[in-house]
């Protein structure tokens, strides 16, 4: 044998061996169809990577949780699915409880009407996915609780909640929130008011105890409509979350950065809501669209300073906020800071290059704003500049044009586009708000 050919020969043998392994794994993967909860649990207990377990169309009543602790692989996840999307209903006392060391699990196509707080991914799980499901779980508690990291929650419909608790709650372990989550294309539809009680947000990302940790997660392309469980619609209580391209429409509750730092909020569409409220530090809020809101943007009036040792549950004073390139149209209140007895206000806030057209006063600030920077803002046809400092704005017609989605935009040839003030290299000025329709999200939309 020519020894110079030996490396190529070894590569060929190795390639053949790997192909054999992959082929064998595919051959061993099975599709198993079951017709009872007992058969479903048995199939899950025996599942191997690549298996697809289908529960036949029908209504199934549970007496306890369906426990999932198996591991698939990235190439061969274990799929647990309805025989047909939306036609297999699980009711009763238990739901899918995905527990450690579960990994690479897909739960797809079910309608869940079992008791609340029974669908969950636990600490120690990873790369699990809930997709194209309907959640309508009765009683107090969450429709879906997510812990563990690298999970994906997409194309689900969460609907018709009339109890305490949330559609979705994100949790963690110790002081660390779940990391690297991707939550997208979900439809959050109709949550009834719980009479002012705290704990009925549509979506809660974290708790105070997790607030100093970073999640590095993305929440995008979700639609919220008619959700009014409490005064907060979305409550973010951690840091390092990107919230972009979401549509919040006809929800009498606020999108709130309640605790945590370094979140990004951009490209979101707010229509007929109380807008966005901000506490915490180093958030960037840009290229969002607010119409018919009251108010549009609320800069929190801090009750304490966590960096100085205040309890994590405090309304942490906002520091170093960046609020730029947002468009506000016909809002009864635009940019506000509400009064607070002995409030600490906010520090080092930049409000720049925003367009405020129509509605009430451009700003109403009722607390300290130490070392604030106001510059390059455009106001037109408002009830006045309010508390905007002289020299920080122009009162000119921005000549906004309504596009096909109903958003008032600057036309491409508008000179204001290239006439902004200040440098903001970390901000994507071109990121425009996205208006989502029910047909584009939820269990019936095509992933």
Image (cartoon, rainbow, N blue to C red):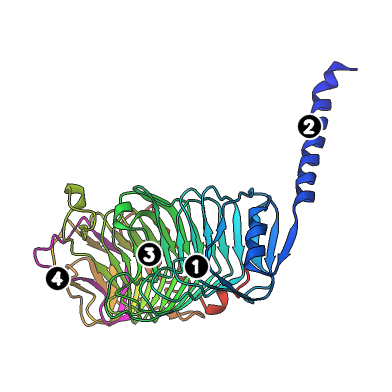
**Is 60 or 330 nearer to us in this picture?**
60
Mark 1 touches mark 3? (CB < 8 Å): no
Q: Which residue is mark 3?
A: 204
User: The C terminus appears in which quarter of the rendering?
Assistant: bottom right
Looking at marks 2 and 4 on the same chain, the residue that comes earlier in the sequence is marked by 2
The stretch of residues the image draws in magenta is 330-357
Residue 302: x %, y % from top left:
18, 61
Residue at point 49% right, 76% down?
136
Q: Would you identify the image quadrant in which residue 200 lies?
A: bottom left
Marks 3 and 4 sit apart, C-alpha to C-alpha, by 25 Å
Which mark's residue is nearer the viewer, 3 or 4?
Answer: 3
Residue 231: x %, y % from top left:
29, 74
Residue 111: x %, y % from top left:
57, 74
Marks 2 and 1 sit apart, C-alpha to C-alpha, by 44 Å
Which mark's residue is nearer the viewer, 2 or 1?
Answer: 2
Q: On the picture, is 283 further left or further right than 310? A: right
Q: Would you identify the image quadrant in which residue 139 lies?
A: bottom left
Q: Which residue is mark 1?
A: 221
Marks 1 and 3 sit apart, C-alpha to C-alpha, by 16 Å
Marks 2 and 4 sit apart, C-alpha to C-alpha, by 70 Å
Q: Which residue is mark 2?
A: 14
Residue at point 25% right, 69% down?
298
Marks 3 and 2 sit apart, C-alpha to C-alpha, by 49 Å
Secondary element at tag 2: helix
């Amino acid at each position: 044998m020519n020894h110079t050919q030996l490396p190529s020969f070894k590569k060929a043998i190795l390639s053949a061996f790997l192909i054999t392994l992959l082929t064998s794994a595919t051959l061993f993967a099975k599709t198993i169809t079951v017709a009872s909860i007992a058969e479903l649990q048995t199939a899950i207990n025996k599942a191997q990577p690549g298996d697809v377990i289908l529960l036949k169309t029908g209504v199934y009543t549970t007496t306890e949780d369906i426990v999932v602790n198996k591991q698939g692989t990235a190439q061969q996840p274990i799929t647990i699915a309805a025989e047909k999307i939306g036609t297999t209903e699980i009711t009763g006392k238990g739901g899918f409880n995905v527990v450690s060391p579960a990994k690479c699990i897909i739960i797809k196509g079910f309608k869940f009407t079992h008791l609340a707080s029974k669908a969950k991914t636990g600490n120690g799980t990873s790369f699990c996915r809930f997709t194209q499901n309907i959640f309508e779980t009765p009683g107090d508690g969450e429709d879906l609780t997510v812990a563990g990291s690298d999970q994906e929650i997409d194309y689900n419909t969460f609907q018709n909640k009339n109890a305490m608790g949330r559609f979705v709650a994100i949790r963690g372990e110790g002081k660390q929130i779940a990391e690297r989550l991707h939550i997208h294309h979900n439809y959050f539809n109709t949550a009834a008011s719980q009479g002012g009680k705290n704990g009925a947000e549509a979506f809660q990302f974290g708790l105070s105890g997790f607030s100093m940790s970073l999640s590095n997660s993305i929440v995008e392309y979700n639609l919220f409509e008619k959700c009014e469980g409490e005064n907060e619609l979305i409550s973010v209580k951690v840091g390092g979350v990107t919230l972009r391209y979401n549509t919040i429409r006809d929800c009498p509750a606020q999108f709130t950065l309640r605790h945590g730092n370094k979140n990004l909020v951009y490209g979101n569409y707010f229509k007929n809501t109380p807008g966005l409220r901000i506490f915490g530090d180093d958030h960037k809020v840009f290229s969002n669209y607010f119409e018919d809101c009251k108010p549009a943007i609320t800069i929190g009036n801090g009750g304490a300073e966590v960096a100085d040792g205040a309890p994590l549950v405090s309304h942490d004073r906002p520091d170093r906020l960046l609020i730029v390139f947002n468009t506000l149209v016909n809002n009864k209140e635009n940019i506000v800071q509400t009064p607070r007895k002995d409030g600490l206000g906010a520090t080092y806030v930049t409000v720049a290059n925003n367009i405020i057209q129509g509605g009430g006063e451009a700003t109403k600030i009722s607390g300290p704003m130490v070392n604030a920077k106001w510059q390059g803002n455009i106001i037109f046809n408002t009830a006045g500049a309010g508390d905007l400092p002289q020299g920080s704005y122009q009162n000119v017609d921005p000549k906004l044009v309504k596009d096909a989605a109903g958003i008032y935009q600057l036309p491409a040839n508008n000179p204001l586009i290239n006439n902004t003030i200040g440098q903001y290299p970390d901000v994507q000025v071109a990121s425009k708000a996205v208006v989502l329709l029910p047909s584009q999200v939820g269990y019936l939309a095509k992933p």
